[in-house]
Image (cartoon, rainbow, N blue to C red):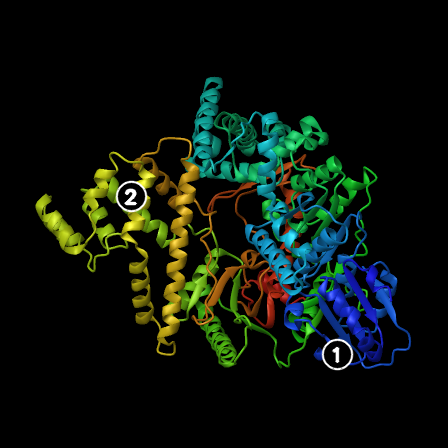
Amino acid sequence: MNSHLATYSYALYADYAQVQRDMPFLCSLLKKGIKVLIFTNKEINPLLLVNIDVAAINKAKLLQCMVVDHSIETSLEVIDGLDISLMKKIANQYPRFNIEQFIIEHAPYKENIMVKAGAGTGKTTVMIDRILYLLIKEEVKPSEIVMITFTRDAAQNMHTKLRNLLFNRFKATSSVVFLSLIEKLNEIRIQTIDSFAKDLLKELGSLRGFGLNVQLRSFTMEKKKWIEEELDNYFEEELKKQDAVIQNYFSPLKVYELVDIINHFWEKFEQKGFSTAKIIECTDSFGAALEENKRMNDLLKTIIPVVEKRFSQEKRLLNAVTISDFTRQIDQVRKEHGTRVFQNISKPIHFLFIDEFQDSDDIQIRLIASIQEAFESTLFVVGDIKQSIYRFRGANHTAFSILKKQLQERNIDMNDQDYYLVKNYRTTSNLLEKMDKYFSSWGEKQFLQYAVDTSDNNKDRLQGMKSVDDERPLVIDAKREENKEDMKTHIMPYIQERYRQINEINEEKTNKENVTEEKEKLAVLTRTIDEARLIHTWCKEMNVPSKLEVGGNFFTSKAVRDFYSLTLFLLYPKNKKYLANVLNGPYGQSDTYLLHELLASNGNDFGINRLIRESSNIDFQDYINQLKYHPVLAVLRSIIQEVNPYHWVYSRKLDERKENQTSEFDEEQLKQEAAIYTKQYELNIGKLFEMMHQRFSEEFVSLHQITNWLYVQIAINREEDEIQVQDSEKGLDHVHILTVHRAKGLEYHTVIIPFTERQFTTSFSKIIFDEQKEKIGWFIRKPGFVPKQNEYYKALNQEEDDEAIKEETRLLYVAMTRAKNQLVIIRNRKNEMYDWWTWSRLLSQVR
């Protein structure tokens, strides 16, 4: 045997009798932390694993045994994955073994590879295994590895899983190799693309005129203000040229509508990857327009470049950028100074992993290619074209081919043929088979990039690895109703029925001893946030426990709004409405709402003070005095610590749950729910203080500034998410309500898709670009009036409509593949008579 030569993995194909004889050698490998794969013809007796903690070894994923009942004449071994052809020969006899994952994990050290990973095929697992292979087998330094993800949750999840696997392997083996890797784990940079670009900008920003501590700003209010000011300048100049009526330039729009449209169009330039220079020089790209639309065309092509130029100047002046601006600024550095400039960054990048690559936009693709050129980095790119659903944000679903082309121009090879994942561990084979009819049909019509051949080499058709007996894993119920409210009578019975099923499944799991499986979940997936909120409202009306998970609701959360009420009162302590609000909340902790009594006091300070003392034990006057002499944030934090609002929050939430929920939920479940809510509330307050410290870190801050900042954020900020707290195993089950975009990467026992009638293309105002970004088409519609457009719009819009069908098909594909066991789709056929493309119409396109 050559097992002693293995440093990372050892695969043995042998008769059971030989496996028994070789077991001492195999155990010695396991104790060293070497992954052992055994292919044999009889189940292995755990007692053969002498002096081995089998549970710990399995948890560390160091031992994998595959059994098929057939005779084995000749033994074979594969050390560290060096003989892939032999490994494939072995795997042919063991169809449940994931040979594709093995090949990717053991790919040649310096090969640039693209992995096409279908939904639920374990791409996170294979990326972690590949990193461990590089660290252990190839002795790559952790600091040389960078992994880019496209969400913070994905980055955190990847880091947690990598850390847990290393910890489990150390626990199972006591090997110093794993201990050393755990200690150096933070040297591996696992970041979102924006965080990665921000770090680059900190080091290279001086080349663009930025200082060291670049600030992050939204500029939301400022942008609209600049547009208004530049419109004033524009109209002033126009009036000097001719005697004209300003309203004629943008009729039938109101001024605020014009500002909103210009702002929306301007944002699209940024989303589509236009650089500042390209926007400033884009005037010729607008082409011509009919006589009645010439003024609007001239206005748009004048104002947008002017405000972009002003925006660029303001960012440098304030040393601040927007979150979407990080990659644009770095791309500009590349254009002005070449890729060699990246060699000046402090930490070289020799191995670059990119997750969800199909969601990359053109600038991000160029950035990745530039990093590869600067450091001759080895690339590991993983994604699935069928799940490219962020085109509205500028994502390019042809990202894989664009990157490969850019690398080929420098004679860099990228293997995009040999690495793919098709074994699905999420969805039952029965449900996958039912869904495949739709996927194949969409593939035939070229709505979805999905191969339709039935051979085993089909890299798009998912192979289900779970088998569950279920007569109706897929339910598609066709209805016809004119509005969403009428659909309630069809949708809610499905939600209630499936919620009861999930409840029963989880109760059975809870009643089993020594079962640590995660609770099953039910999800309702919608296309828009408004649809999700409607479902949430219906669930609340019918007392079905639900969670609305559409994101962007941090600043509208109860924790932030309660805190805002506190700052308003501290700023205006004599305002009776503010006083009543704070007394009746977690910071005053009064049992009754006192506004009417306070108004009846007619400004009598003695009466007001008496009411405060009688209704609350909190000495607000002391805090008001402290604010005169102490730092504002310090006083606010001391109020949180001394008042401790969380007990009050817990008590109120528990009372609310008891009042609203039916008797089928026991008190312990309701207490768990209240505890989870309170924990989230507390974490949100912590996040708010962190954001305030970042926002006001370099200036003296007043209570007035903080209150104004909160006012603006509550009014307009829909980007920031609440802190999420994991559900308790003993708590209530919920209907999880979210949009398809938010559900990306998640999985649920049962998925319900309630609304399918929304047409893909709308008649609202929009701006579109050709592929080369040399032609710009715009269209402005106000109901009841003749639309306006320029000469390029009609041709470009035809292409846009075709792309919209493909994008919506990918969205529906993502929604359907979130389901593990059951999928329910309610088809509303009301718009099919108009020849409009909808999800409902797509579902009728079956072979």
Horizontal side of residue 555 vs 190, given as left or right: left
What residue do we see at 47% from left, 26% from top?
230
| Element type where label 1 sits in the image | loop
Query: Relative to 426, does residue 155 appear above or below in the rendering?
Result: above
Q: Say the numbered circle drawn on residue 462.
A: none
Visible in this render: residue 67? yes
Residue at figure coordinates x 82%, y 62% from the top left: 4
Q: Residue farthest to the front?
A: 51
- Residue 317 shown left or right of residue 648 in the figure: right
On the picture, is 435 further left or further right than 259?
right
Q: Position of residue 330 (x, y in %)?
A: 63, 34
Report if residue 825 is visible in the image: no
- Quarter of the N terminus within the rendering: bottom right
Q: Which residue is mark 1?
A: 44
What's the residue type where badge 2 is placed? Thr
- Residue sitting nearer the eye, 451 or 399: 399
List the residue tagged with mark 2.
567
Q: Are marks 1 and 2 in contact (CB under 8 Å)?
A: no
Q: Residue at x 57, y 25 (%)?
A: 209
Q: Going by the image, does 767 lie left or right of 247?
A: right
**Which quadrant of the view contains residue 143?**
top right
Mark nearest the camera among 1 and 2 is 1
CA gap, disc 1 and disc 2: 67 Å
Judged from this view, the residue extending furthest toward the top is 240
Residue 502: percent from left, percent from top: 50, 75
Label 2, secondary structure: give it.
Answer: helix
